[in-house]
Image (cartoon, helix red, strand yellow):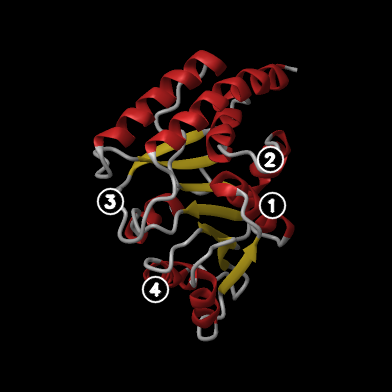
Amino acid sequence: MKGTLYIIIPAYNEEANILNVINQWYPVIKAHSAHGTSRLVIIDDGSKDSTYHIMLEASKTRPLLLPITKENSGHGGTVLYGYKYALDNGADYVFQTDSDGQTLPSDFEKFWWQRDNYDMVIGWRKGRQDGISRVFVTKTLKFVIKCCFGVTLTDANTPFRLMRTSTLRKYIDFIPNGFNLSNILLSVIYAKKGCSIYYIPITFRPRQGGVNSINLPKICKIGRQAVKDFRRLNRELKN
């Protein structure tokens, strides 16, 4: 495969973090520019603050940075939008992380070294530092996925994953447009279809600024709906 890399980062009301995130991740895309064809794609999900303005200003001196804005559709819908954008624009590899500063660019190279050995390389948030409630949610999710889909995933929802687009293109249409848990479902699909998945431990820090738009009550609400969706989607995957 060629080496065109698209880094996809969704952003919502991240004016406190977004410039730092750009400064941290731009050197990564510059180091893997593939003769100028790679892009750092940051997608503003209808923010109500100055997130998109900061992105636009930063792009004036960073030619590989591509700021996009769209109507709000939530994290999962925005991630899916980004993946499809990368596929439509010739990416060979897609990497996704978040805009809250919890992940470290220094972990990226370990993933890049494995890019042609696996269909998907996912970060394992071993010893995550963002609170016991989030650890509980991750363990519960693992149990729910096992019950609904019959597969075991080490860390299905980590926002630190590298994928070959040749595989992603085959399965992305299984995910409904705007689906709130796109990364989870994508991990499940890869496992159900027998794709090769490799987990690498990563550092996962507390949010570096701003306020998380997803709180525990919202997580519980999403979780209840997810169980219904997962059961329906599992039937579709079997067919």
The type of residue carrying mark 1 is Lys
The residue that mark 4 highlights is: 23
| Rendered view: 101 above or below 154 | below
The residue that mark 3 highlights is: 205
Toward which corner of the image does residue 40 lie, by quadrant?
Answer: bottom right
Few, some or many residues within 10 Å of mark 4 (<14, 14–19, 20+) = few
Distance CA(mark 2)–CA(mark 3): 29 Å
Distance CA(mark 3)–CA(mark 4): 17 Å
Which is more N-terminal, label 3 or label 2? Answer: 2
Few, some or many residues within 10 Å of mark 3 (<14, 14–19, 20+) = some
Cβ atoms under marks 2 and 1 closer than 8 Å: yes
The residue that mark 2 highlights is: 172
- In the image, what residue occupies the spot 54% across and 85% down? 60
- In the image, what residue occupies the spot 74% across and 57% down? 88
Is 58 on the left or on the right of 215, as rendered? right
Distance CA(mark 3)–CA(mark 1): 28 Å
| Rendered view: 86 above or below 80 | below
Give how far across and how far down residue 237 sits, in percent: 69, 22
Give how far across and how far down residue 166 sits, in percent: 67, 46
The residue that mark 1 highlights is: 84
Question: In front here: 118 or 54?
Answer: 54
Question: In front here: 28 or 228?
Answer: 228
Give how far across and how far down residue 133 sits, in percent: 29, 33
Few, some or many residues within 10 Å of mark 2 (<14, 14–19, 20+) = some
Distance CA(mark 4)–CA(mark 1): 25 Å
